[in-house]
């Protein structure tokens, strides 16, 4: 079932982060609406989630400009909100879902595959939060594919390495060139001054607790959702 993390900020507010797994069901944006709404309620209570239609880019959407209706979701790969009680969420099935934990004010979530990382999605989110007057203290990164399962073409690997450093070069369990997403994400955050990056969950291809498009061609998605909450930890649903 969903893994919950809670962060108390200096102003007394709390950031809740929930990371779902296979047992929580399918959180794909195009899943049947009634069933999807019920799964979301089971994770973070009754407030509708704000989501975007992910396109492997670096566009950051503001939650106050996004409908809670998935059919009207804009194309973007990150969401930021300053509203208390509004869950913002991204989905994954090999790409990394990320929560940006700030010291006050707005928070954000992002969907980061290799194309998004190359496009600078982490930089874009950090810059947007900075423009809104807050600082990223840490990142929580949900389940994603590991290098042992992520064989990668030489040209694309060279491209990512040219942007994020040679530490992104990994090796599959069969000994072939691979992309190390953890190293790519760590490098991306280091470039914007964030060193506290917490990785949660196993490789999505190796471990069936989550979903994998690459390993099993699964259409379902797990989710990472975050919200700002006023009050005590005991008030969490």
Image (spheres, rainbow, N blue to C red):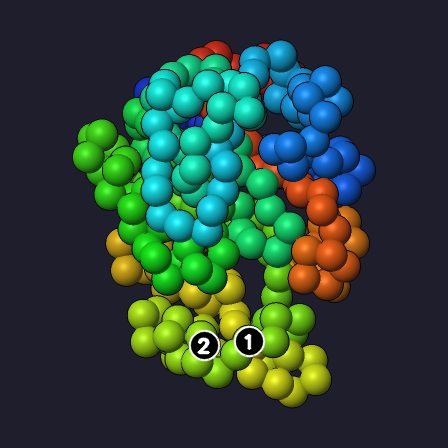
Q: In the drawing, does residue 85 fall left or right of residue 133?
A: right
Q: Which mark is residue 152?
A: 1
Residue shown at the point (65%, 87%) measured from the top left: 175
Q: Which residue is mark 2?
A: 157
Q: Position of residue 71 (x, y in %)?
A: 55, 25
Q: Quadrant of residue 212?
A: bottom right
Can the viewer see residue 2 in this picture?
no
Question: Camera-side residue: 61 or 85?
Answer: 61
Q: Quadrant of the image for the N terminus?
A: top right
Distance of label 2 from label 1 (alpha carbons): 6 Å
> With respect to residue 158, does 150 lie above or below?
above
Q: Position of residue 180 (x, y in %)?
A: 52, 70
Q: Secondary structure at mark 2?
A: helix
- Asked if the residues shown at circle 2 and circle 1 are in contact, with their CB atoms under 8 angstroms apart, the answer is yes
Can the viewer see residue 220 in this picture?
yes
Disc 2: CA contacts within 10 A as few (<14), some (14-19) or many (>=20): many
Q: Secondary structure at mark 1?
A: loop
Q: Position of residue 119 (x, y in %)?
A: 34, 57
Residue shown at the point (32%, 76%) measured from the top left: 162
Q: Quadrant of the image for the C terminus?
A: top right
Q: Quadrant of residue 135?
A: top left
Disc 1: CA contacts within 10 A as few (<14), some (14-19) or many (>=20): some
Residue shown at the point (48%, 15%) measured from the top left: 85
Whichever of labels 2 and 1 marks the residue nearer the N terminus, that label is: 1
> With respect to residue 187, does 221 lie above or below?
above
């Amino acid at each position: 079932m969903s893994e919950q993390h809670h962060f108390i900020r200096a102003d007394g507010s709390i950031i809740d982060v929930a990371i779902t797994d296979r047992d929580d069901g399918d959180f794909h944006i195009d899943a049947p609406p009634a069933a999807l709404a019920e799964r979301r309620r089971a994770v973070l209570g009754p407030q509708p989630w704000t989501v975007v239609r992910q396109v492997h880019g670096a566009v950051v959407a503001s939650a106050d400009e996004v409908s809670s209706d998935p059919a009207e979701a804009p194309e973007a790969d990150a969401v930021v909100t300053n509203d208390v009680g509004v869950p913002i969420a991204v989905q994954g099935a090999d790409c990394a879902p990320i929560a940006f934990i700030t010291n006050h004010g707005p928070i954000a979530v992002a969907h980061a595959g290799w194309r998004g990382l190359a496009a600078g999605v982490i930089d874009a989110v950090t810059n947007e939060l900075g423009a809104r007057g807050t600082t990223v203290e840490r990142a929580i990164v949900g389940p994603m594919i590991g290098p042992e399962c992520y064989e990668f073409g030489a040209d694309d690997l060279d491209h990512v390495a040219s942007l994020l450093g040679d530490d992104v070069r990994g090796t599959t369990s069969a000994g072939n060139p691979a992309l190390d997403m953890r190293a790519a994400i760590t490098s991306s955050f280091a470039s914007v001054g964030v060193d506290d990056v917490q990785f949660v969950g196993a490789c999505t291809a190796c471990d069936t607790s989550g979903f994998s498009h690459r390993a099993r061609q699964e259409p379902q998605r797990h989710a990472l959702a975050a919200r700002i909450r006023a009050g005590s930890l005991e008030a969490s649903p």
